[in-house]
């Protein structure tokens, strides 16, 4: 099946709360902070007396705090106007169904609903499926 006349559709699902925004910022900051700590250790940019896990933990915590603060600041500055969740979907205006020439008549009947449940008399379920 091939779709044509594609268009992007965004459905507005709801407004994010202050807690949602802060939590998402903290999670982003946590991941970035952990990656920074790991890269600092990987490139040997810290003293050897620090444990790798302690360094990664501390940078992750600092990243979470900074990420939450930056996200909350952005939420306050925009007064929550830009904080919403959406579902991004791609919709097709029409579809083209491609089948082998031997199955073309049967595919047309199936699309028009002439076969009931998609089975012809005397055919097995495996034979009536169209890929």
Image: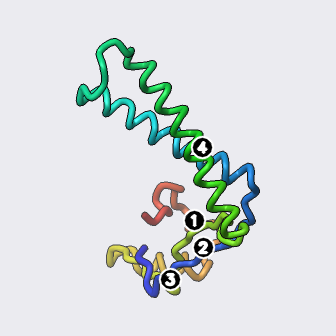
Residue matched to label 3:
7
Q: Closest to the observer: 25 or 69?
A: 69
Chain-order first, disc 3 or disc 1: 3
Number of the front mark, 1 or 4:
4
Q: CA distance from mark 3 to mark 4?
A: 34 Å
Q: Position of residue 61 (x, y in %)?
A: 55, 32
Quick one: label 1, few (<14), some, or many (20+) residues within 10 Å?
some
Badge 1 marks a residue whose secondary structure is loop
Q: CA distance from mark 4 to mark 2?
A: 55 Å
Badge 2 marks a residue whose secondary structure is loop
Q: Please, is residue 93 above or below residue 102 in the view?
A: below
- Side (left or right) of 12 relative to 131: right
Dots 2, 1 in contact, CB < 8 A: yes
Residue matched to label 2:
115
Q: Position of residue 79 (x, y in %)?
A: 72, 68
Q: Please, is residue 62 above or below residue 4 in the view?
A: above
Quick one: label 3, few (<14), some, or many (20+) residues within 10 Å?
few
- Side (left or right) of 16 relative to 27: right
Q: Quadrant of residue 13?
A: bottom right
Q: CA distance from mark 3 to mark 2?
A: 32 Å
Question: At x 39% / y 74%, what residue is drawn?
Answer: 103
Dots 3, 4 in contact, CB < 8 A: no
Chain-order first, disc 3 or disc 2: 3
Q: Position of residue 130 (x, y in %)?
A: 45, 66
Question: At x 60% / y 43%, what residue is drawn?
Answer: 26
Q: Please, is residue 44 above or below residue 4 in the view?
A: above
Residue matched to label 1:
119
């Amino acid at each position: 099946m091939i779709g044509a006349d594609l268009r992007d559709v965004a459905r507005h699902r709801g407004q994010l709360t202050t807690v949602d925004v802060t939590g998402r910022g903290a999670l982003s900051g946590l991941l970035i902070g952990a990656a920074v700590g790991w890269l600092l250790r990987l490139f040997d940019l810290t003293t050897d007396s620090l444990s790798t896990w302690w360094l990664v933990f501390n940078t992750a915590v600092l990243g979470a705090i900074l990420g939450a603060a930056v996200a909350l600041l952005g939420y306050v500055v925009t007064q929550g106007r830009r904080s919403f969740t959406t579902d991004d979907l791609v919709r097709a205006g029409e579809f083209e169904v491609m089948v082998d020439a031997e199955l073309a008549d049967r595919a047309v009947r199936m699309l028009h609903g002439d076969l009931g449940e998609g089975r012809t008399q005397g055919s097995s379920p495996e034979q009536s499926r169209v890929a």
